[in-house]
Each structure stands twice: as C-alpha cells, then as structure tokens.
Amino acid sequence: MLDMTTNFDLAPLHAILEEYGSQKGTVIPILQRVQDAYGYLPKEILAEISKRTNIPLTQLMGVATFYTQFRLSPRGKHLIRVCDGTACHVSGAPHIVRAIEKEYDMPAGSSSPDLKYTLEVVYCVGACGLAPVVIVDDKVYGRLSPDAVLEKVRDV
Amino acid sequence: MSLLKSTDDLLSLRERAIYALGVRVPGASQPQFRNDVVVCGSTGCRSANSQQVLKALQAQIIQRELDKAVRVISTGCRGLCAVGPVMQIFPSGVFYNRVQITDVPEIVEQTLVGGKIIERLCFRDVAQNKRLAHYLDIPFYNRQLPIVLRNCGLIDPQNIEEYIATDGYLGLTKALELSPEEVIEIIKNSGLRGRGGAGFSTGIKWELCRRVAKQPKYVICNADEGDPGAFMDRSILEADPHSVIEGMVIAAYAIGAPLGYIYVRAEYPLAVIHLRRAIAQARAYGLLGENILGSGFSFDLHLKEGAGAFVCGEEMALIASVEGRRGEPRPKPPFPAVSGLWNRPTVVNNVKTYALTPRIILRGPEWFSSIGTSKSPGTAVFALTGKIRNTGLIEVPMGITLREIIYDIGGGIPKKRQFKAVQTGGPLGGCLPASALDTPVDFDSLTEAGATMGSGGMIVVDERTCMVEFAKYFLTFATAESCGKCVPCRIGGQRLLEVLTRITSGAGTPRDLDEIERISRNMREASLCALGQLTPGPVMSALRFFREEYEAHVYDKFCLAGVCKGLYELHVDADRCAGCGLCKKACSQDAISGNRKEPHVIDQLKCIQCGACVEACNLDAIVAQPRGKGVHAIAVA
Ligand SMILES: Cc1cc2nc3c(=O)[nH]c(=O)nc-3n(C[C@H](O)[C@H](O)[C@H](O)COP(=O)(O)O)c2cc1C
Ligand code: FES
C-alpha cells in the first residue's frame, strides 16, 4: 500500500526495522536491506528511517554517501559493470569504458538518459585470468574488444 | 543439540570423514568411489562456465550409470585461473584445462571409462613445448608450497566433514588442551607475521590484547580485500572457509574473547554464501557456540558485509564500519589490541593469518619457522596477474625470488614481449624493474628494494604499459578512496593527481618532477593513516626506477609504451612483421594495409591510436614512435 506522504510502500521498511530493533551498529545492514527492497535509497525512506530509529538524518546521509555500494537515485534496467582492476586495466579496460560512455552518453557511474543502462566501473571481480572483464547484468564476459562488448550490450 | 561434545567425538567423526573423502586421500583403502573428479567452482572458473561443465559431467555420469563409481565435486580455486575451467581426476592426478561442455562425453568415455588421457585438454607448457597430463608435472604447481591453500581445489568447501577429514579443527582441539598463554607462546615462537600487509608479529599482538584487563574482547577477521587485482583472500574464503573460522576460534581462546566478526567485502557474493554456510555448520557441529568440545570455552561469530570502501581495510576504519559509522580511521595509538571495537580490546587479523594459525598449533612453531626466511617465516600467497602466462593463485615459501615466481611459476611474459615491471602491495605498494628480479620475496627485502609485501597482489607488466600512466592509475584509485578526514591525504592526493594528469597529457614541465617529490614527502609525513602515507608509493617507485619515462613525457612529449594519447604514433616494425594480417583485421579504421606475408603499413591520417592492433599482434611488431617522426621518415624515403 502506498503511503500518502512518502509515495512509497512502507511495509518492507517496517519489517526491516522491526527485525533489527534497537541493536547497536546496524545502520549499514539496515541501509543494505532497504536498498535491496527499494532498488536504491530514496530520500523519503531515509527520512522515515530517521524518524523511526531516532538516528539523525545527517548521520544516515553521511553513511549512505561514504560507501560506494549505496545509491541515492534509481538504476537503469540493465547493469553494465566494467572491471578496471589492475589486470583488466593493463589489458585495455579503459578503451572499453570509453566506448560505452560514448555510445550511450553516460559517464561511468551514471545511467543512460532512457534508464535502460547503468554503467559502473568496478575494481577486480576476481576473474583476472579473463581480463578485460565486463559483467552485463549477471553474465560475465572476458577477453572482448570494445566493439564486441558494445555488441553484447546492445543485445541484452 | 550440537553434534560434537568432546575431542573424542571429533576424532571419531574424523575417521569416518577420512573414509568418505575416498580417493582424494593418498593410499585410501577400499574407497566407495573409484574416481573423484573435482571441478573448480571459484569465481574465475565460474565465469568461464565451469558450473555448466560440472552439470553436464554429472548428467553424463548418471546417464552412463557410473554414479556408483565416479563422483563429481565442486571445489574452490585450483590456482590456474588463466586456463579455466579446470578439473582434476583423483586418484590419478590427471589435470584438464579449458574444458568445454562439448568435451564432457569424451572425458567420460576416454578417461573415466577407458583410462586414457586426452592430450588436447592437458596443460600446454610453453617452455618445454609439450602437453603435461599430471598436475604435479606442471611447473606452476610443483614449485609451490601450499599451507593456506592446501585444501583449495581439493575439498568441497560447503561440507565441514571434508575439512575435518583433512585435519580440520585438530589444531583447535590441541589449543583447547593448552592454556591461552601457551597458545600465544607457540604463535610467538613461530615468528608468524600478519599477512594483511604490515607484517606485525601476530603473537605479540595477541599477547598485548590478552594483557588488557577490559572485557569483553573481540576478534575480527579483515576480509575487506580491496586492492584492485587481488583475489587471494576471496579465494581462500570461497575454497576453505573453515580454516579461517578455526583460526579465529583459536585466537579468541588465546585472548579470551566471546565474540568475533568477519568483515567481508560485499562484492564477494560467493565468499559470503560459503562463509554463512560454514558458520552455520560449525555451530551445528558444536565448533562455535557454548562450551566448545566440552572445554568450557564459548565463542560465537558473526558476518558483517562491507559496503564498498577501500579504506575500510585499514583496521581502525574497519572497526568504525563494524560499529555502523563512516569508515574513517583515527590516529594510533591506542592500538585496537588495547582499544578497538566499542573501545574494547580487539585483535584484527587478515584472512591468511587466521588460516595459518591452526596449522602452526598442530605442527608446532619449529615446523613453521623452518619454512621461509628467518625474519619472514612461512609462506606467502599471491594473486599473480597482468601480462603473465599463468595468471592465478599461488603460495610459495618466503625467500623465493621474484624471477622464480614470474618465470618458473608464472611461465613468463606472453606474446614475445619483454618484462618491464612487477607491482606488489597494490595501490599502496610499489613497482620494481627487471634489475630487481632477483630480490627475495619477504617483508623486509621487498621494502628495502622499494616496493612492499602488501596483502598479496602481484601484477606483472610488459613494455606496453606506460609507467607514468600505471602510477596514475593507482593514484586515481587511492585518492578516490581517501576518506577525506585529514588534509594531507585529501588535498595532497588531488594535487599529485593533477601533476600526473598534466604529464600524461603532454603538458608536464620539468618542475613537475620536483613537485611530485615535494607533495609525496608531505603526504608521507603528515597523513593520518597508512592510506595517505602510502598513496605516493607507486608514483615514487615509478619515478625512482623509470625516471627516463617521466622525462620522455615531459621533455620529448613522447610515451614510449604507446599509451598516453597524443604522445605517440604507431608504426609497424618491418623487421618483426610477418604479414599475418591480424592487425589489419583488428583495425576498426581501415588504417592498416599490406599483402599477406609482407610487412604491413599504418596510415597515420586514419589511425586513431586505439591500440587494437598492438593487442592483436603476437610478434610485438607494432611500435610507438614520437609524433611526426615516422611520417617524416616515410616521406624522405
Ligand atoms: C588503506 C588500507 C587498506 C588495508 N586493507 C587491508 C585489507 O584489505 N586486508 C587486510 O587484511 N589488511 C588491510 N590493511 C591492513 C590492516 O590495517 C591491518 O594491518 C591488518 O588487517 C592486520 O592484520 P594482520 O596482522 O593479520 O596483517 C589495510 C591497511 C590500509 C592502511
Ligand atoms: S582485475 Fe579485472 S577481474 Fe581482476
């Protein structure tokens, strides 16, 4: 059910907060769970967490902006992760990043204007033997040229 | 009710578990299965489709009604990630690589039924130019000494009984029979130094923590492995999670801690799954929880997932993160052993440090200190990557030289290219040139040579890597990860990055070289934590060993490696070109022309310097030259 003031369904949030109760040191797990439930961390939800837990909103925002895992805006439908870990970097990962950025007009870390794709640059996904590595949604591709990567992205 | 209530319970379970491990125990008598086939299920091989191969193999075995004789097991990393998916057949030790689903029927028919070796699937050793059928024939393996990695690729990481069969939790039973002080004494005498990077004595750290009167105490496992291009800790957690848990219980017993945390990177989903399951199993078996093995000692363990911040690998930042705050370090002392989590005495150790502990308790401090060098006893685990043939996970005795690792184990540099540098210690480490290849690998020698041991990332680069750009890469990473709390790190890193950006874009001036040294010195001396203090490391070591490359960028506006845009032109070296046409095919601009078997030529007006031809060429025949020179030369000729 949509909550009138926030325009979000608050039921998942309440379930999460219930579970953690008043244990200490739970800000990060709560935000992780909330992001899993809502896809990102909407401002309205953060305000609601603050209201219910008495954790100041500034503190929640401080944590949310510190860690790269947390997103404050929604993500595109397909997630493209290009590895720029050292092994991939020396095997041409920067060429791949540049090619995708150019093709879809989305700088690394942002989404395409039509919200179809989100581009993330990550550091080592542990498949260095396949460098350079690109993960489109959950499929891992290795040893591809920039052109071949664009093709895979187009075809998702 | 827990399963094991005493050491005797564990020992009798161990007997049964050893039998169940079957032919994977050397000399097993009357095993239930004639063959065990282990397929690597670690992240690297998984992305090369190992899980599909495994399923196909299982299906085929059932279809051929071999399932009473042959068993398939999904294990952790077998090490040779470069040629995944890999599998090994027990008891023969036959090792297959690059296995595809289409190979499965043949493997079953030829090898599992017929006992024949399929040559095509064997590892090809380039130096000897032959295929090697048995894994112990492969130089990559036979130069190693696995202690931490001893179970990786051998046991099913999700089955605690397989760990128990390979001496698992025996170290714990021995520790529980000793006093905590005696346990600490053993660790101290072994000379074990922390494997997270700093190399601090583990025994002394535990002793310090034991002596502090405050309660409760905590143990934390640092599994935040954030170096780009490093996957040692992840592989261990995926392949043998119980070794880390056992080490933590021993540490907790030694310092007197009732509770522990494993802080693991959230980007490691498989490691998280395996750890969760391992913790649940250890609880169910009574190896975690109340009154462990009837000793009266109680200890429990929780998992904390990080949220993506490299600085959280630093122990004080990690503690702040476990407490649910921004991961910002604070000055030390007081050290965490005195005042750590919730201001209580806390031991923080690396994954590998904990994994070594049970072995040291079991086999004694003299055994451990007899391996490696006197000041760095034991082994070192590395993730060997970059421009090297045998990318993968290795464990070697300390004191081995870089050359042995790179050429004997790593198989050298592919594509006829030349070794240029090896980077250890990740973004906080340094790079060493060819002249340092005979440096022994241990904490002190690497530091003396100008790099650091770090946590185990080892990246090899060839002459196609620009050392200025490479240093800039690490610097970009480290500055983005600065938590922002102290000025020297936050501002210094940015200024340093600006200087390097100028140099790699051709706008550098001679003064910039002095500027690098000045900023670096300030960051080293004034930053709050090791992140800021060590951030200049890669830049400084590159400047020290590859100064001529910096100078070529500054004075000649030339990037010899052909990496920095606008600072080079690509040309075909006619002496090396065999006219194979690979470069022509790779070029998206149609800039390359030439007849087969004749040297090709690059049209400079069409070339956009994307480097695709450089990657495509197997003969290292495409070279970078200063701009304008090549065209000029052609015009004159
Ligand atoms: C920026 C930074 C990142 C670090 N990252 C890690 C890491 O990923 N894993 C680790 O074990 N130690 C890391 N350390 C070292 C830890 O602060 C600490 O020394 C170590 O966990 C102690 O364990 P050990 O004695 O077993 O090595 C890092 C240090 C710094 C300054
Ligand atoms: S550096 Fe890309 S997978 Fe490791």
Image (spheres, grey):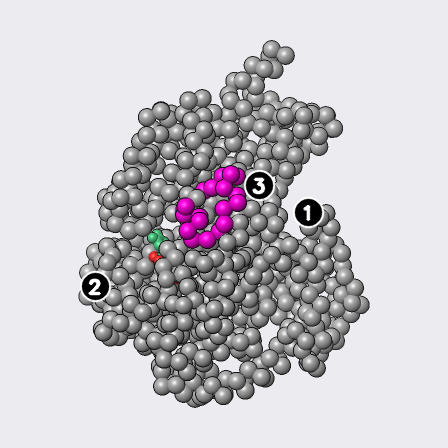
Residue A151 in sight: no
**Tags 2 and 1 touching, CB below 8 Å:** no
**Element type where label 2 sits in the image:** loop
| Ligand 1 quadrant in view | bottom left
Tell me where residue B515 appears, x and y as whole percent: 31, 31
Chain at numbered mark 2: A
Q: In front: mark 3 or mark 1?
A: 1
Distance CA(mark 2)–CA(mark 3): 48 Å
Quarter of the image with the N terminus of chain B in it? bottom left
Q: Is residue B282 magenta?
A: no
Q: Residue at x 45, y 39 (%)?
A: B470
> First in sequence: mark 2 or mark 3?
2
Q: Residue at x 60, y 12 (%)?
A: B635
Distance CA(mark 3)–CA(mark 1): 25 Å
Tell me where residue B300 appears, x and y as whole percent: 36, 77
* Residue bearing mark 1: B126
Q: Residue at x 62, y 55 (%)?
A: B140
* Residue bearing mark 3: A145
- Disc number placed over residue A89 in the picture, else none: none
* Residue bearing mark 2: A55
Q: What's the amino acid at mark 3?
A: Ser
Q: What's the amino acid at mark 2?
A: Ile
Chain at numbered mark 3: A
Label 2 and label 3 in one chain: yes
